[in-house]
Image: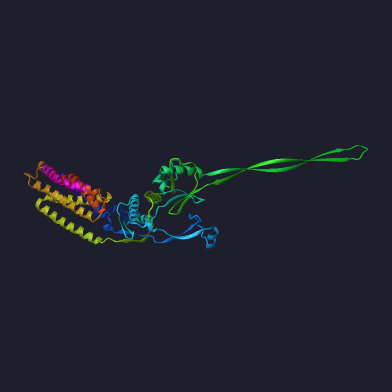
Amino acid sequence: MKKIKIITIIVLVILITMVSFFGVYVHVQNRMENKVRDYDLDMDLQGARYVRLAVNKESKDVIKDADGNEVDTDEEMTDEQLAENGYTKESVPNNTEDSLTVENYEKSKEIIEERLKAQGVDEYEISVNSETGDILVQLPENDSTDNFVSNINTVGKFEIIDADTKEVLMDNGDIKLVNVMYGSSSSTSSGTTVYLNIEFNKQGKEKLANISKTYVESDNTTNTTADTNTATENTSNEASDETETTDNTDTTTNETNTTTESTETTKKEITMKIDDEEIMTTSFDEPIENGKLQLSIGSATTDADSLQDYITQATAMASVLDSGNLPIQYDIESNEYILSDITNTEIEYIALAVGIVLLIGFIVWVIRYKVNGFLSAIAFVGLISLYLLVIRYTNVSVSIQGIVGIIVTILLNYIFINKILSKIKHSEDSKKLENVKEAIKESYKEFFIRLIPICISIIAFCFASWTTISSFGMVMFWGVALIALYNYLITATMLKVKAEK
């Protein structure tokens, strides 16, 4: 019975080790795919996307009327047409000299940071050159990176204007917050719809209510009156036997008025723009009193990939509008992926060195502690395998500091198990179950009391804003948790079973 228990635990350890180091492969279409999740590597191990933003130095042509007001027109006007309308054309820089200040450089950096956080980018590095205003953004390379980069230099100028007169009705100053919502109608099977929810402040709420009452589709009825002349002939014939027949005809004209009603639909529309790009032109069906404007992104869908694309688009747009305008217009000067200085070969060398040291340590255990040392070595391998799986499935970003944390965890576990084995060996009767239990209990108490200051530091590291430090903290947190739990369930159980009569 004792052998069956130990063999069962050993088989379990072997299975965990096979899954962790070799994976689980499933036939997908024409290939074998590993279903075990890969490691989430930090930028210092995986490489990163480097995006450099430079201050825009270009100018744009602005048309102004006789009063100096800017004329919004998409028509390309000749000099003769400008003169006829009393317009003048001026070349105006996209970034005025007054806007090129250190304060605006820093504000731009902060706004870009807010947008990255709003889009779920936890790991990034951003710096600004206070002299030139250039901003360098370092991002992890993944499937979402291109989407982040495409929106990173968007100014975020929001406007709702009259579609005909081009009068600005609302702008960024009226926005309170912007977020993403999605839901499906129970009455239809068309799927889920993603919405961009724009909530306006008190001033914007009043403006939206007035606009939604004014810019509506309305029906105008026109009355048309027509005059119709109708001629009626009345004829009477008088005849006698001896007289000549005479025809008398009276003609009467009657006038009739006919009224016709015709209905004409007129529509006052608004145009919504972001960075002078038209998003939509529409009118309102009913007044909006709650100060919230919900815009559907894409169409209702049941396809998971399409739904995720719509959510990504809406999230990017929400992050731009919610963070406010960039005070300076930037251009993407460079966008390149740079590999890490640390190669996979170097990481393999580190793993090999740790493996060799552990193997030597296991041999020492077997020589000193015999069967207990052998069983502890097998359990140790299982802990490492489970540890690597936990790191993968808890979204821990592994950095260079994270690798150091893994090595430290392995060292702590070796010290802990060695303490247990030493106490068992030096007990009065190492083969007695009560002595084994007492040795394990004392080892837990002594080891984890001394580990309390380290545990406090580890928890603090987990909440650090610097990813490399938080990586070390998270790796160590799961490591210490496994040392306590795994050894109690596996290592201690094997040693107790071996001591049973």
Residue 235: percent from left, percent from top: 82, 39
Q: Is residue 382 above or below residue 257?
A: below
Residue situated furthest right in the rendering: 242
Residue 206 location (% of width, % of height): 45, 42
Estimate the x, y position of residue 14 in percent, counting from the top left: 21, 51
> Which quadrant, please, contains the C terminus?
top left
Magenta span: predominant SS is helix
Magenta-colored stretch includes residue 396: no
Nearer to the camera, 364 or 128:
128
> Left or right: where does residue 384 sit relative to residue 442?
right
Q: In the visual, does 220 lie left or right of 94?
A: right
One can see residue 323 in this view: yes
- Quadrant of residue 145 in the image? bottom left
Q: Is residue 53 left or right of residue 229?
A: left
Q: Is residue 451 magenta?
A: yes
Q: Which residues are magenta?
A: 437-459
- The answer to whether one can see residue 292 in this image is no
Q: Quadrant of residue 398?
A: bottom left
Q: Residue furthest front?
A: 67
